[in-house]
Amino acid sequence: MLSEERRTEGTALTQPASGRLANPDIRDEFGLETIDMNMGPQHPAMHGLLRLILELDGETVVRCDPVMGYLHRSKEKISENRMYPAVIPITDRIDYMNNMAMEYGYCLAVEKLLDVEIPPRADAIRALMNEFSRIMSHIPSLGFLLLELGAFTPILYAFRERERIQSIMEAVTGARMMFHYIRLGGVKADLPEGMPETMWEYIEGLESHLQPDFIDLIEGNEIFIARTRGVGKITPEKAVEMGLTGVPLRCTGVEFDVRKHYPYGWYKNLDFDVVTDQAGDVEASYRCRIGEVRQSIRMIKQILENLPEGEVMGDTGRRIRPTEGDGIARVESARGEYAVHVVSDGSDTPYRVHYRTPCTVNMQLLQEIVPGHYLPDIMPIMGLIDPVSGAWDK
Amino acid sequence: MQTVLNLLEAEPIRLFLSFAVILFLVLNLAGILTFAERKVAAYIQLRYGPNRVGPRGLLQPAADVVKLFTKENVMPHRADLWIFLGAPIAMFLPAAAVWLVVPFAPKSVVADLNVGIVFFIAMTSIGALGLIMAGYGSRSTFSLLGAMRGAAQMISYEVPLILSLLGVIMLAGSLSFQDVVNSQSGGFWHWYFLPQLPMFVTFYIAGVAEARRVPFDLPEGESEIVGGFMVEYSGMTWGLIQASEFASMALVSAITATLFLGGWQPPFEFLDLGNFNWLWFAIKTALIIFTFQWIRWSLPRLRMDQLMDLGWKILVPACLIWLFVTAGAMLLLPSVF
């Protein structure tokens, strides 16, 4: 239990949520007290490094203060001290479940300041790898959701899928996780020989075993429905007001996807739907993620069918030195809208880089919607947000 | 030789030896079950499971026990020493003691109590005490929450557990396990799971809850309260809690087999193995344990309020209805029973 000083320290870090007792009358009558609980940062379900200061009335949460900052690695400051191409590996480590989108956003932002034409093949490969990266992030996040509900097996099926994609990624980029593949002006290397066929084969296979391995195991399960339906309910107005993006926004029924509404790169040429759901609860977010995996499969097929020929690297010159000014790029990462703002003073290194990661913004949900829920509901709500500690702390 | 045998048959010595054998059995059972659990989990999750220690990994439990014995026992600061250390024992002894009344074969039962079923109920209730001691004694919010959940769950599920036994007791007309088994003789269509199907299902579900297994492992709830009442335990105290969990799982399976699946009775009369009928008992128990493990690795966990709903709003009414049906049938058709 927290001592009084530590409690006030916690509240000083974040504003207290609308704290209210579930049953104030009973509390007065019997002189009952709420208990404080410190969940995390060393807690198996706290995605590594999140601390929640909870006030509990029995099993009901009356106050939830998330404390972030346990994985702060000064990404933005480090970026200021490196030359432009050398920042890309730094961005890889922001959202380590969906690295490709992180690289993509930074490269797009810098390319706005550079006089360089991206070859169409490079654009197509960027989109292709991005979608693989999205599948690589969405499928384990389904597994994590189930793991947090207490089912251990789906996470292993999910990681089997992730491993297979990682092998493809390794063949293309040379790395299994920290790819450093998208470069300023194009991509590092062309696809290896025979790779499009391998990818096609894998995608066909994924489509056929998505149903038995994930959907059949999860969807009809009554316990899963009982634990997720109506849990973490968000209204569309609230979601827009809080600035949510990605699945937490789309599962409330708001149709917003950067790829669709502010298309970049090869996404202009692709035909896909924005997956939305009306319910706005954890179950809806699960359906959205499955739907997005399906859409990614569709996009990958389209890209592979019309893969343009040619170079994969534009001419950026030997020394990359963007013009003075600032460039903003927004991309749709697996967790929502990821934006990069690069300010250049005309030198080798950026004057200022800002990463707008979706996790940081989406985490506001915890403070807003957790109070009033039961303690075990925090885990599925975390699954709805699907945060990555590297991305919320940077 | 004869004197030795006579000595063995003297009542105090027989009881002492039997209890030693039972304790040996239960402790080994816990080891075997951890191994089985891990192999079943591995099979479901498409991996190998333990396969390094000994042939096919069979010595893994032994290695685990050695590890647990050599580990330091960490006591939380300002924990209540006697309650903290007494809890694992208070959990383990009741789970082991019920084995005394379980009939393994026609003549193999340590104490054929005439109130064996009541003894079983009493001992499982005491198990909840150990759980509360563990949660209260370790002075941690997580443990306390786990213990609160555990107490609520064990007490709520005691009710359907007992109610579902009443049908069998009525049909057998006895509270002794051996009598219940004897009254199920003559082929599997005489076993009580057929006339008492709703009770059988209820007993199974309540049994899973009593053994604190997924989907009812809320006292542990490793994703929210990180192990609940046993979060502060380490070394052999933790090992003892684990052993009692496995012992109570095996116990619930054995009782299910005894009361509803005919205990040591063979499925067909020509398969009667005489004194080796304990094989049938072992097979039935193992099958039920396997279903426990199957559920454990496939399903998510319920929430506390949903658990209470299931217990009080579905299981208890179902039991009561079937109790009346059974009583009515016995009253109206005395010739059949």
Image (cartoon, coloured by chain):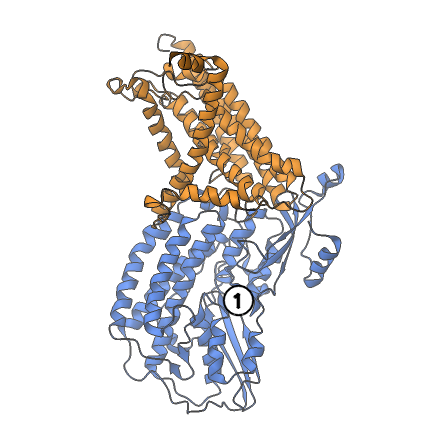
Query: Where does residue A270 sit, x and y in percent of width and height?
Result: 35, 72
Closer to the camera in the image, A277 or A222: A222
* Residue at the limit of the structure toward the top, as seen here: B335
The image shows a total of numbered marks equal to 1
Q: Is residue B330 left or right of residue A43?
A: left
How dense is the environment of label 1, judged by Cα within 10 Å: few (below 14), some, or many (20 and up)?
many
Question: Residue sitting at 41 percent across and 66 percent down?
Answer: A134
Q: In this view, does B236 lie above or below A356?
A: above
Q: Label 1, on which residue?
A: A390
Give how far across and how far down residue B300 sits, in percent. 45, 45
Above or below, comparing residue B51 to residue A326 in the picture: above
Asked whether B24 or A170 is in front, the reply is: B24
**Residue found at x 32% / y 68%:** A168
**Tag 1 secondary structure:** helix
Please state which of residues B286 and A133 is positioned toward the viewer in this rendering.
B286
Quarter-wise, where is residue A163 in the image?
Answer: bottom left
At horizontal 53% and vertical 56% (from top left) the residue drawn is: A382
Q: Which amino acid does label 1 sit on?
A: Gly
> What chain is tagged by disc 1?
A
Quadrant the C terminus of chain A occupies:
bottom right
**B172 lies left or right of B118:** left
Output the letter for the chain in orange: B
Which of the chains is blue? A
In this rendering, the answer to whether B289 lies above or below B79 is above
